[in-house]
Amino acid sequence: MTRLIVAAGGGGDAVAAAMLDAALHSGESPAMILTYAWDRLLIDPVPGPRGPANFSGLHPLTRSVQAVHADAEPIAPAGSTLPRLAAELPHTFALIDPHHGAEGITRQLEELIEHLAPESIDLLDVGGDILARGDEPTLRSPLADALTLAACCQVNAPVRLLVAGPGLDGEVPADDLRDRMGPSVLTLTAEHVEPISSVLEWHPSEATAMLAATARGIRGLCEVRDAGLPVPLTDEGPTVHEADLDEALNRNELARAILATESLEQAEQHSREVCGYSEIDYERNKASWLGSQAEQKLDPESALRQLDQFEAEARSRGVTHTTFRRITEALGLNGKDRQDLRDLLLSSRPDQYQAPLWHIPAEA
């Protein structure tokens, strides 16, 4: 017997799944985590999610599900954080392949359930945009969540829907989510963060970084993403809530629209019709724009000067914290420079590091 956790949006949701599993089931065998390989352009320069064809060294679990172990490698030019996650965490990471639409993910889930006979199945979303309707003006990345929600609602097994860190993804505000969630099942603490603390030192997820930060007691206003979205860090940040799966499907117009899709392209088209856009189109446009820009190399003195200016402007907006992803993009640097920039900042101004976030003091 084992447990299965579906990381609704991939990326940082997989890290949060490992943290939640350790918090709820300390001392037990780790769960299997079913997740996308969708790390956005900071890690993966290729728009959209990766499928099995984008990796070497995968390990078959069922006919249509493969595990990503530490020896797997993304095939260039693709990139992925999953092999390193598999190397550093005790969980087994299985790959969601969304290229056959919601029907394909449903099939993968059914095969895994038959293969594992899991004692529990959780669908986990950090931030709560899985509870969106689809027309919220702040919604930016609904497709991955809608696909996993649609698939989980079609399997013949009970699935518990969990939302960690309401509002922390900067999409649907926590105030708008309160009447869509049930009671809190857990409030994460610094002790719960410890099993994934080494991962947070390199993983680019902003929502999971803020989830961990709030669990460690950090409060304030955090600016994230290339758009500089402000996200409040409050006492609600480290909470994990259960939500009704059927109600979520009934509310989520995109998830309902893609229930019978057999390809990612079909799901994308529904996203354009329901939400007015496809987040993969956004990635395509951004990748094209990045490809047209002259590559800017990291110059330490220039970077620190730019950081001073960025912090002054952020301070005027009431911002107290930010992420290394946000700093990297605000300084116009390539995603490959993120770790070098982080090392520079930690060595030059270590007192501003409030792991895993960067603190912007009230005065320069």
Image: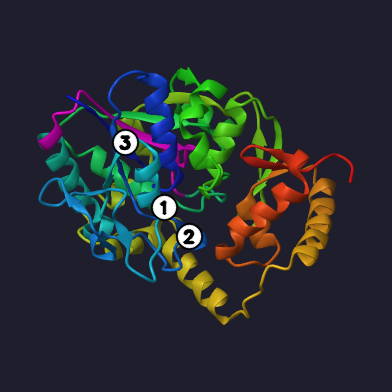
In the displayed orientation, state which residue is furthest to the right.
363
Q: Which residue is mark 1?
A: 81
Rounded to the nearest whole Å, what is the CA distance between mark 2 and mark 3?
21 Å
- Where is residue 362? Give x, y as percent: 86, 39
User: Is 245 contained in the magenta span?
Assistant: no
Horizontal arrangement in the rendering, residue 48 relative to residue 104 (left or right): right
Rounded to the nearest whole Å, what is the CA distance between mark 2 and mark 1?
8 Å
Q: Tell me the element at label 3.
A: loop
Is residue 172 visible to us here? no
Is residue 26 visible to us here? yes
Q: Tell me which residue sits at (15%, 45%) in the image.
A: 61
Rounded to the nearest whole Å, what is the CA distance between mark 1 and mark 3?
14 Å
Q: Tell me which residue sits at (66%, 72%) in the image.
A: 297
Q: Amino acid at mark 3?
A: His
- Colour scheme in the image? rainbow
Q: Are marks 2 and 1 in contact (CB under 8 Å)?
A: yes
- Label 1 CA crowd tier, 10 Å (few <14, some 14–19, many 20+): some
- Residue 91's label in the rendered image is 3
- Where is residue 256? Give x, y as percent: 30, 46
Mark nearest the camera among 2 and 3 is: 3
- Where is residue 282? Give x, y as percent: 49, 66
Range of residues picked out in magenta: 115-134
Quarter assignment of residue 124: top left
- Residue 43's label in the rendered image is 2
Q: Tell me which residue sits at (53%, 70%) in the image.
A: 286
Which quadrant does the N terminus fall into? top left
Q: Amino acid at mark 2?
A: Ile
First reached walking from the N terminus: tag 2 or tag 1: 2
